Each structure stands twice: as C-alpha cells, then as structure tokens.
Image (cartoon, helix red, strand yellow):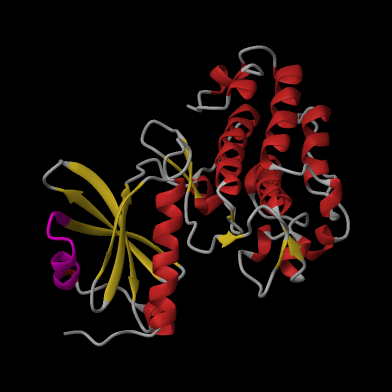
C-alpha cells in the first residue's frame, strides 16, 4: 500500500494509486487525469450503472485536519449543488489513503482557458455566477476564491461555480478572516488584510474577474495590483458602456460599505445596465445559457 502523503507531498504528486481509488469507487470506471489544483487531483470517471460521466476530485488523508476539511467540503457541496450554476456533487467517499468527491463532469473548460469573451458574454457569465453566489450566501457560506479558473462551463456552455472547498460558514453576518485564504490576484482588501469578510467580499472578486476580462482581453495588467486595495480601478476600454463600467467600479470600491451589499444587488445593477446599453433580449443574444431568478429574467 502506498504511504499516506502529507499535504506538501500531495501537491507534488503526479498521480494517485488508481487501484486504491477504484476500490473506493467500485461502481465507477476511472479514466485519465483532468487537472490539479491546491491539494487535489481531478480524474475523469464514468458511473457504470447509471452510465454517467463524472469528475473525481481526489485528496490525500494525512490526519484529522485533512479529513475534517474533506467532510466540510463534501457537506457544503451537498447543501448548495441544486443551483443550476453550481457544480453538482453526486457522492463523497473516504478510504484509508484518499478521499474523493464525485461530481458532474464539465466539458466546456474554464473561463481562464477562454482567450476571447465578448462584453455580452462576460456580463451573462457574471449574472450566472452572481446568482450562484447569492444561493451560496443564503446557505451561510462565503466562497472566498472566485477567480477565472473556478468558473467552468458545461458542454452546452452553461457557467458553473466550482471549488467551494475553502468556503467559510458565516451565518449571514460579517466574519473576521483568520488567515489569508484565496487567490491574491482576486482578493478584496479586507481578505488580504484579514479584516471583516461578508457577501461584499465575493462580490468584489466577481467584479474583478469581469473587469479583468474586459481589459486587455483578460490578460493581467497594472489594474491587478495592490494599488486596487486603496482606489477602485478606472481603466476600461472605450467600448465598455459607461453604465456597465459604473456598476463594476462600485463593486470594486476599496471600502466594503460602498459596494453592493449582496450578490443579488450586484446582479440587479449589472442586468439593468446591460438592458439599457445592450438592448432588449441582450441575454439571449449573448449565447450564454443562463437560468436566473424571476426579477432578473425581466431584465433580459
């Protein structure tokens, strides 16, 4: 039997013991590795009884803390996976060496892998992820790591929020960041400086993702720097309508109190700006499949 890896060793693993993984998941055929991120490796799989393609997120167990983190992630996913724009989870399994989460396989890649995204497409993706964040927040969890690689697409192009493994329970009220968690390039100031986190923290990160994709085709530039913690970025291409730019700048305010208080508030502002500037039926014309709350549907 392979020795149990520590978290540091797990990040360097090129593979896992697929025989051990297969014993954990007897009803699932294990395929090739799809990718890696943080402590996890992700493999393709197929549930043979129901003939369903899946993705299998595998983590190493090195102690009680790792097991607790796995159980926390599995339970969070089970709570929020019924939203159309959150990745669905089918099961969580625990073995002697590994833990595994079996979830839907998304065949459309990540936002980070898309070289070109139009204004309408990016705004539609933003509405979908804002809706997913609102749902997550209403279940008392902050995501804390909204970034392009955590926005994936189903085969039909529907956006999905993924990787809630570091989600934090917050019971609706702001909580103090106990340590720096997330991806620095997309953190809000309060996250980096371990201040009070709330719904507004995820709103900031989502707005920055949208903003970045509208500047220089999504390539990181001077706007993604520590200076943004002190002043909302202002550089946007001339073809971004002023109404949409204003929504993004408000969501990127350094002071949390100046941002939209919730993901839904941000979504309503963005949807209204898009209808004003992009015209009626803009969402359908974007080509991005989305399923939104009723009041947002009226801004299509």
Residue at position x 23%, y 44% in the image: 53
Q: Quadrant of the N terminus?
A: bottom left
The mark total stands at 0
Q: Position of residue 13 (x, y in %)?
A: 34, 77
Dividing the picture into quadrants, the one containing residue 255 is bottom right
Q: Residue furthest bottom?
A: 3
Q: Residue furthest top?
A: 280
Is 25 colored magenta in this rendering?
yes
Q: Is residue 237 visible?
A: no
Asked if residue 27 lies left or right of residue 132, the reply is: left
Asked if residue 165 lies left or right of residue 100, the reply is: right
Q: Which span of residues is magenta-colored?
A: 19-29
Q: Quadrant of the C terminus?
A: top right
Instruction: Choose between 79 and 219: the one closer to the eye.
Output: 79
Residue at position x 69%, y 50% in the image: 199
Q: Position of residue 202 (x, y in %)?
A: 66, 51
Q: Looking at the image, is 75 positioned above or below residue 95?
A: above
Instruction: Choose between 87 and 75: the one closer to the eye.
Output: 75
Q: Position of residue 8 (x, y in %)?
A: 44, 83
Instruction: Choose between 27 and 175: the one closer to the eye.
Output: 175
Residue at position x 64%, y 22% in the image: 295
Q: Is residue 190 visible?
A: yes
Residue at position x 66%, y 65% in the image: 184
Q: Looking at the image, is 222 positioned above or below residue 216?
A: below
Dividing the picture into quadrants, the one containing residue 213 is top right
Is 224 colored magenta in this rendering?
no
Q: Looking at the image, is 110 positioned above or below residue 270?
A: below
């Amino acid at each position: 039997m392979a020795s149990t890896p520590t978290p540091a060793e797990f990040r360097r693993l090129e593979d896992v013991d697929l025989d051990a993984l297969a014993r954990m998941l007897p009803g699932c055929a294990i395929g090739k590795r799809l990718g890696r991120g943080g402590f996890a490796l992700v493999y393709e799989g197929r549930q043979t009884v129901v003939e369903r393609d899946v993705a299998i997120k595998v983590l190493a167990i090195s102690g009680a803390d790792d097991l607790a983190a796995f159980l926390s992630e599995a339970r969070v996913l089970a709570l929020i996976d019924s939203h159309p724009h959150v990745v669905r989870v089918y099961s969580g399994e625990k073995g002697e060496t590994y833990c595994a989460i079996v979830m839907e396989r998304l065949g459309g890649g990540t936002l980070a892998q898309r070289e070109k995204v139009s204004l309408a497409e990016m705004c539609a993706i933003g509405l979908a992820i804002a809706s997913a964040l609102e749902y997550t927040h209403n279940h008392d969890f902050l995501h804390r790591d909204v970034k392009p690689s955590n926005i994936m697409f189903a085969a039909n192009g529907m956006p999905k929020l993924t990787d809630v493994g570091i989600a934090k329970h917050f019971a609706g009220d702001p909580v103090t960041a106990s340590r720096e968690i997330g991806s620095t390039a997309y953190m809000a100031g309060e996250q980096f400086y371990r201040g009070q986190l709330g719904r507004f923290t995820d709103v900031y990160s989502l707005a920055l993702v949208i903003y970045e994709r509208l500047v220089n085709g999504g390539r990181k530039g001077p706007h993604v720097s520590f200076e943004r913690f002190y002043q909302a970025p202002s550089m946007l291409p001339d073809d971004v309508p002023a109404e949409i730019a204003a929504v993004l700048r408000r969501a990127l305010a350094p002071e949390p109190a100046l941002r939209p208080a919730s993901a839904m508030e941000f979504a309503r502002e963005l949807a209204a700006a898009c209808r004003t500037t992009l015209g009626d039926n803009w969402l359908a014309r974007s080509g991005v499949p989305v399923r939104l709350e009723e009041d947002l549907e009226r801004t299509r």
